[in-house]
Amino acid sequence: MWGRGEIMRGTMCSLAVLAMLAIAPLGFAQDEGPRPGGGRPGGGGAAQNSDDNLLPWDRATEGYTKSAGSVSVWRKDDSLYFEIPSALLGRDFLWQIEAKETPSGGYNGTAAGDSVVRWDRRENRILLRKMFFNNRAISDGAISRAVAQSNVNPIVRAFPIRSVSPEGNVLIDVSSIFLSDVPELSARQLFGGGNMDRSRTFVERVNAFPENVNIDILATFTGGAAPANPFGGGGGLGRGAGSQPSNTGVVNHSIVLLPETPMMGRLFDSRVGYFSNRYTAYTNDFPGTKAEAFINRYRLEKKDPSAAISEPVKPIVYYISPEVPEKWRPFVKAGVEDWNEAFEAAGFRNAIMCKEAPENDPTWSSEDVRYSMIRWAPLPIANAMGPSVTDPRSGEIISAHIIMWHDVLKLGDQWYFAQSSANDRRAQSHPFPDELTGELLRFVVAHEVGHTLGLPHNGKGSAMVPTEWLRDPKWTNENGTATTIMDYARFNYVAQPGDGARLIPKIGPYDKFSIEWGYKPIAGASNPYAEVMTLDKWAAQMVDNPMLRFYDNFNSADPTAQSEALGDDAVKASTYGVMNLKRSMGYLLPGMVKLGEDYSEMNRFWGSLTSQMRTYIGHVVTVVGGVEQIDYRGGRGGDVYHPVSPQRQKEAVKWIVDNVLTTPTWMVPKDITNKLGSDGGTSQVLAMQLSALGGLTQDARLTRMVQNQVHQGSAAYTVPMMMRDIRQGVFGSVEGRNFTLDVYQRNLQRAYVQALMPRMAPDATVARPYAVAEMEALRALLSSAAGRAGDEESRIHLRDLARMAEWALANPDKVAPPAAAATAAPQGRGGMSCWICDHHLL
């Protein structure tokens, strides 16, 4: 997401082990031998009882209407029969459940989940089994039998056979599985939980096709809550978030026949980012279990395997759902097809395309699991999400279901104003031109499509670019603003007016590399293990080329894996960013206020500027005590962990002192703050300063600074050094005689003393000795300074702080517990979903 759902990731084994396994046959435990309950893969098992109790076919189907397909559906009102050919008994089907229509506050396209199921025959019953593939036997023989015996797949329902056709097709009544809420195939979470009310649940529509069945159910659930905003903020529009008597909506069941032979999987490697399906492998050739995973990717095969670049046999197609606003559709299409550039690196031309869904086809369903869809949700949620449906047997992506919430447009505008308005006149007043908003939407779509191609967030993508390169129009136009569009590197805040650099991200060098690594065919490889040596050589390119490095999501300890960041130098990039923020502050009144309107829009965009400043603070703070992590392997690179140099850490603290602890009055101009509140912006400034101080002094950071002394010895930037630098930043204004302290300085000094106190408690952690030493230094400083102050307000303030310090040192057992300290680390916008504000999450 910006957001995918939780995807299990596997861990690769050593190359030596994989090389041994390259000669072993790949198999799945569930496919070996007879399964309990009868039936083998590819067949239905023979009926062992007489068919005397079965109805004649004509009588059994009398009054029903048939929708013919791979599995035909017979319907009469709310009664449903499945006609299953004997050849499909024992075959794997993917069963996807999704919301098609929802109560107020929900949104269509929400998935309840997907499962692999099989229909098996046992005498005169058809068993519906839910299949699991999390334990697999890689070798034949006893280990395969052992795995099969320990992994019996559950029977979800058993259906009496009502009739058998002359061709041998079996007829079963499946009404109950759609008109009640079966735990293994439940839709209740789509509608706030609760229980399905059978008396208010109906079959809406049935369509059968050569490979799948789509069934819509108008379902009512009672006793649950209103559909909730998945990113916080309560329930839906027009309803509270509390208990509701009823929730009604349309549930779509899409059941598709999976390939009889699964696509050959490609084994996961943590050096190249892919979502994956994890499993535990059992083999005769390895002493113990092995964690393995197949990456998620579409099945893409060349029309001409001998050609360096060929069109695919079957391209990847995304459909724009009919509810997507017309004026944004060209930008959505462009965002999808931008990925063709990356697929050419993998040897495919015109690999991916985008079409508008047919609006007048009664058999078309945007919920159909066969189709990759881009949906539009009319809710005030500033986010987008790119989940996909995969075949767990192989990692093959069956389809994607991207959701764009309406207010993602608003969020894009806010970020672009804060980060790029100094370089783009179009963004200096609001509303933006449609062309600009469309360009921002195109970027969002391209990012979400990347998720649905199998790619997770790459937290290192921005930090691998030298900061000064982001001011270069040639480099940015060719490569974008980061190595990958899958990082949370939004818009180019480093570029300065006149540079002419590109401002909006695009498909970058890492994107092309990762698509090549995941999708390029490897000639002669007959099983996943035969690909490993080649894949390792490709992945090893990241040793010498940092542009190809990957980190899964973000890391609060690693300054090269930060959300919302740009460039390889956080201090330099943030300095450029602040220069642009100061320029953008001047656009608020002339550009965001219209005649006769209130100041709510100006407040929204002022908030985007202050939020951006907090983001820069978070990036710089992470440098202190920072440790860069690089995913090197044996013989593929050197040390994995690299502490940040002492000089860079000291520079970071100096930046905080100069730009944050020294009052950033440019952020609170009176002509803005006097229209938005009565405190003159003091609360905003103090919150920002406390965020920086809390981040610098959090326990995890202090611990890393102590540990870094092991690597850096006497040259290390130590905690006492940092505390002295912070003290100078907070109390440097009390030097000399006849000084006066303004309200911003007094607020900061008082908050600093108060924040130290809980760190002095006897049960406090690593911070305690440093907090005590700092308070002792402050006691002496404050007592001296109070007598040198030039006004009564400053003297009263300093004397009170001195008394607080004296009391805290005398009564460490009475200070507030550590949890009460304002020590939360500053974080950028970031996590499970891609665009929503204030999440790491992002």
Image (tube, helix red, strand yellow):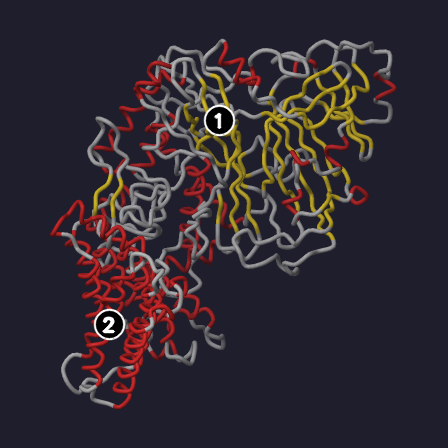
Q: How many marks?
A: 2
* Quadrant in the rendering for residue 366: top right
- The reply to whether residue 88 is in sight is yes
Name the amino acid, label 2: Val
- Return the x and y of residue 108 as percentages of the image width and height: 61, 46
Query: Residue at position x 49%, y 9% from top?
Result: 141
Find residue 730 and name its label.
2
Name the amino acid, label 1: Glu
Q: Is residue 157 above or below residue 458?
A: above
| Of the pair 812 and 213, the residue shown nearer to us | 812
Left or right: where does residue 621 sit relative to residue 53? left
Q: Residue furthest bottom?
A: 792
Q: Residues within 10 Å of mark 2 (few under 14, many from 20)?
A: many
- Return the x and y of residue 600 as percentages of the image width and height: 47, 71
Query: Helix, strand, or loop for circle 1?
Result: strand
Q: Residues within 10 Å of mark 1 (few under 14, many from 20)?
A: many
Find residue 86 and name its label.
none
Left or right: where does residue 727 sit relative to residue 32? left
- Return the x and y of residue 345 as percentages of the image width and height: 32, 29
- For disc 1, the marked residue is 396
Q: Is residue 838 above or below residue 605?
A: above
* The N terminus: image quadrant: top left
Q: Is residue 242 above or below residue 166?
A: below
| Of the pair 796 and 451, the residue shown nearer to us | 796
| Of the pair 765 and 158, the residue shown nearer to us | 765
Left or right: where does residue 168 sit relative to residue 92? right
